């Protein structure tokens, strides 16, 4: 797969997208041995499979990172709820302790 074959396509892209296209086009270089072992009549197939495989690996990694972030956020929210519950219980307990004093003042 020659980069020159795709020059007209690349030139038709917006200038801001050309860097991403070049980066994508370089991905199969990481999988040259797998591509060369995959003898296909259509040379584009190993190229596309290399890009798909690379993106698949990135997606798996990102999903794992998102799950870790969700777990961290969920644990943080759980701790906040527990603290809020404890504070509410302490306030109720303090209010119950003040009640006898208030009743004595009322009687006075």
Image (tube, rainbow, N blue to C red):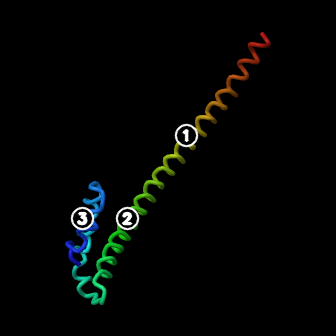
Secondary-structure class at tag 2:
helix
- Label 2 to label 1: alpha-carbon separation: 33 Å
- Label 1 to label 3: alpha-carbon separation: 52 Å
Number of the front mark, 3 or 2 = 3
> Residue 93, how many percent across, how many down?
66, 31
Labelled pair 2, 1 in contact (Cβ < 8 Å): no
> Residue 60, how many percent across, how many down?
40, 67
Depth check, front residue: 48 or 73: 48
Give the answer, above or below, for where 59 lies relative to 103: below
- The residue tagged 2 is 61
> Residue 70, how many percent across, how many down?
47, 54
- The residue tagged 3 is 22
- Label 3 to label 2: alpha-carbon separation: 22 Å
Number of the front mark, 1 or 3 = 3
The numbered mark, 2 or 1, whose residue comes first in the sequence reads: 2
- The residue tagged 1 is 83
Q: Which residue is drawn at 21% across and 76% down?
A: 2
Number of the front mark, 2 or 1 = 2
Give the answer, above or below, for where 40 lies relative to 6: below
Query: Quick check: 67 left or right of 91?
Result: left
Question: Residue 8, located in which quarter of the rendered image?
Answer: bottom left
């Amino acid at each position: 797969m020659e980069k020159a074959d795709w020059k007209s396509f690349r030139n038709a892209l917006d200038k801001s997208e050309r860097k991403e296209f070049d980066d994508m086009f370089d991905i199969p270089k990481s999988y040259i041995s797998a591509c060369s072992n995959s003898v296909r009549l259509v040379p584009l197939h190993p190229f596309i499979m290399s890009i798909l495989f690379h993106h698949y690996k990135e997606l798996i990694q990102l999903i794992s990172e998102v799950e870790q972030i969700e777990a961290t956020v969920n644990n943080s929210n759980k701790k906040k709820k527990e603290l809020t519950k404890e504070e509410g219980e302490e306030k109720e307990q303090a209010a119950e302790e003040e009640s006898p004093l208030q009743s004595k003042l009322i009687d006075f």
